[in-house]
Image (spheres, rainbow, N blue to C red):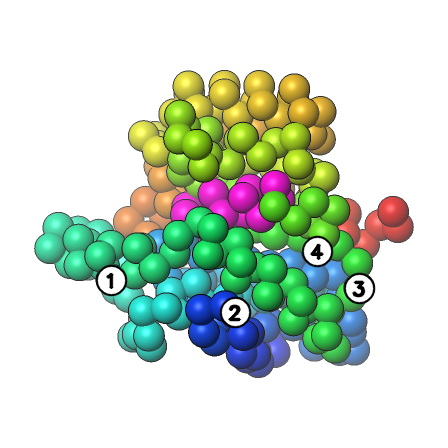
């Protein structure tokens, strides 16, 4: 893991207490603040590594455990779980159903309030980045919290612009954040039709946005994913860090 200081806070939400990991760099803060939204594998070393590496670039990174409604759990062996249909279905039934979009947006509202009170967090708008399901939630957050979210990034997020009523692209007119979306060339959950629909919605709403496709499979960033692509994971850092650096610039 990249060197960072790791602490935890408990965030009280309408549904309980959401453990949240806080990665900060060494030295004195406060620092520009980024919320990191986990993928479907949950909190595990691979997600902690992503948060620690981002923190090493002088950010305070808040990584909430979105599966808190399911109770404490051991880190998931993602490769084994994804490769075993019975394990994946059990994982979906226990954990994925515990992250309904509306409730998770409420969770993020509580987290934003907690961040305001945290000594490591620089005041003002924050950034948010998410992976897979977290990428979808990052866009939902951008559309739900207006100018409280300054930058929103989604990497291999799925379901970003579907025909469903709760699809994130419908919130484009409410987005104040700068938006960056990186899809995968091999990803049925965010195909070319969704990409075109998302771009059209963001453009119509005049959102400062970039939507592009990496030559990779869905889930290429976390190191423990079967689809992990080291080269494209580094590509992700080359876009994410400069994007979040903009949080340091005066408004």
Q: Is there CB contact under 8 Å for labels 1 and 2?
A: no
Residue at horizontal 34 percent and vertical 59 percent from the top = 98
Can residue 135 be seen here? The reply is: no
**Image spot of residue 117 (x, y percent):** 72, 74
10 Å crowding of disc 3: few (<14), some (14-19), many (20+): some
Q: Is there CB contact under 8 Å for labels 3 and 4?
A: no
On residue 151, the disc is none
Instruction: Decide whether residue 141 is among the magenta residues.
Output: yes
Q: Earlier in the sequence, mark 1 or mark 3?
A: 1
- According to the image, label 4 marks what residue? 126
Residue occupying the far front of the picture: 14
Residue at horizontal 66 percent and vertical 37 percent from the top = 175
Q: Earlier in the sequence, mark 4 or mark 2?
A: 2
Q: Earlier in the sequence, mark 2 or mark 3?
A: 2
Q: Is there CB contact under 8 Å for labels 1 and 4?
A: no
1 or 4: mark nearer the eye: 1
Q: Secondary structure at mark 2?
A: strand
- According to the image, label 3 marks what residue? 123
10 Å crowding of disc 2: few (<14), some (14-19), many (20+): some
Q: Earlier in the sequence, mark 1 or mark 4?
A: 1
**Image spot of residue 238 (x, y percent):** 61, 44
Q: Is residue 107 left or right of residue 56?
A: left
Residue at horizontal 70 percent and vertical 55 percent from the top = 126
Q: Secondary structure at mark 4?
A: strand
The span from disc 2 to disc 3 (Cα, nearest Å) is 21 Å
- According to the image, label 2 marks what residue? 13
Q: Quadrant of residue 52?
A: bottom right
User: Which stretch appears magenta?
Assistant: 132-143
On residue 94, the disc is 1
Q: Is residue 172 left or right of residue 13?
A: right
């Amino acid at each position: 893991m990249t060197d960072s200081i790791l602490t935890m806070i408990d965030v009280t939400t309408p549904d309980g207490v959401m453990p949240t990991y806080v990665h900060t760099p060494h030295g004195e803060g406060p620092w520009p603040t980024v919320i990191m939204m986990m993928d479907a594998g949950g909190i595990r070393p691979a997600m902690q590594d992503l948060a620690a590496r981002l923190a090493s670039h002088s950010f305070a990174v808040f990584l909430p455990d979105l599966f808190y409604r399911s109770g404490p759990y051991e880190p998931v062996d993602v490769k084994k779980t994804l490769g075993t249909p019975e394990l994946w279905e059990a994982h979906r039934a226990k954990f994925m159903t515990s992250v309904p979009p509306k409730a998770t947006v409420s969770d993020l509202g509580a987290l934003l309030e907690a961040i305001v009170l945290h000594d490591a967090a620089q005041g003002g708008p924050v950034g948010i980045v998410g992976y897979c399901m977290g990428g979808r939630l990052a866009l939902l957050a951008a559309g739900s919290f207006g100018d409280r979210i300054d930058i929103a990034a989604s990497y291999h997020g799925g379901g970003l612009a579907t025909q469903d009523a709760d699809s994130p692209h419908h919130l484009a007119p409410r987005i104040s954040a700068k938006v960056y979306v990186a899809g995968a060339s091999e990803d049925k959950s965010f195909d070319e039709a969704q990409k075109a629909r998302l771009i059209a919605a963001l453009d119509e709403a005049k959102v400062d946005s970039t939507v592009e496709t990496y030559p990779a499979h869905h889930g290429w960033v976390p190191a423990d994913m079967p689809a992990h692509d080291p080269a494209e994971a580094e590509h992700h850092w080359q876009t994410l860090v400069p994007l979040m650096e903009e949080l340091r610039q005066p408004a």
